Amino acid sequence: MDQFSFSNGFVLPYAGTSVALVDDDALLRDALARLLEMTGMTVEQYDSGEEFLDAASTSPADCVVLDVQLGDLSGIAVAQRLQEIEPRFPIVFITGSIDPVFEQQADEIAGAAFLRKPFLRDTLIEAIEAAMATRENPQPDSAPNTRADDMR
């Protein structure tokens, strides 16, 4: 990931990294976008899985942060369809649910990270880095998925 340094020495460590953020909660989506943009990331916001899938083939995003419980399609369904049409995206699932079924389904998607809300900005950034690294350096039989519990 590229860094951008200002003349005063301040560094934006993730300048050049683009994230697609898919969440039907506009307030949360805007807050997460602002947090990621403060690190230098560029964020594309989508309020539905269908909207993101329509744009996926032309999206410059390096990673997708995807809510599991979307209004139109589940985040798992979006990820499965995304793997079929545009498999280059590492995925970070986010959810407020404690249902273990979602985590089991996410486990089946290679290179995906899984975070439960609420989480810290740094935990999200670490999950994005881990998902991107897994996709850039795939392991045989896919590497284990990253969970927030593994990053503390």
Image (tube, rainbow, N blue to C red):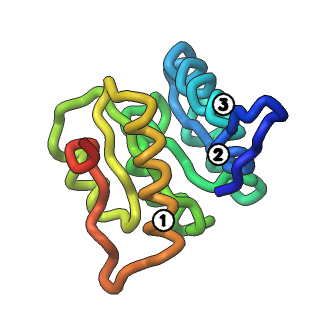
Q: Where is residue 143 in the image (x, y as percent from the top left)?
A: 31, 72
Q: Where is residue 78 in the image (x, y as percent from the top left)?
A: 49, 50
Gap between marks 3 and 2 measured at Cα? 9 Å
Residue 144's tag is none
User: Please, what secondary structure does the residue beneath circle 3 have?
Assistant: helix
**10 Å crowding of disc 2: few (<14), some (14-19), many (20+):** many
- Report whether 86 appears left or right of 7: left
Q: Please report the residue visible at 38 percent of the width from the left and 49 percent of the height from the top.
A: 76
Q: In which quarter of the image is residue 44?
A: top right
The disc labelled 2 sits on which kind of residue? Answer: Tyr
Residue indicated by mark 3: 37
Gap between marks 2 and 1 measured at Cα? 14 Å
- Contact (Cβ within 8 Å) of mark 3 with mark 2: no
Quadrant position of the N terminus in the picture: bottom right
The disc labelled 3 sits on which kind of residue? Answer: Glu
In this view, 19 is above or below 72: below
**10 Å crowding of disc 3: few (<14), some (14-19), many (20+):** some
The disc labelled 1 sits on which kind of residue? Answer: Ala
Q: Which of marks 2 and 1 is nearer the N terminus?
A: 2
Q: In which quarter of the image is residue 48?
A: top right
Residue indicated by mark 2: 14
User: Please, what secondary structure does the residue beneath circle 2 have?
Assistant: loop
Residue indicated by mark 1: 133
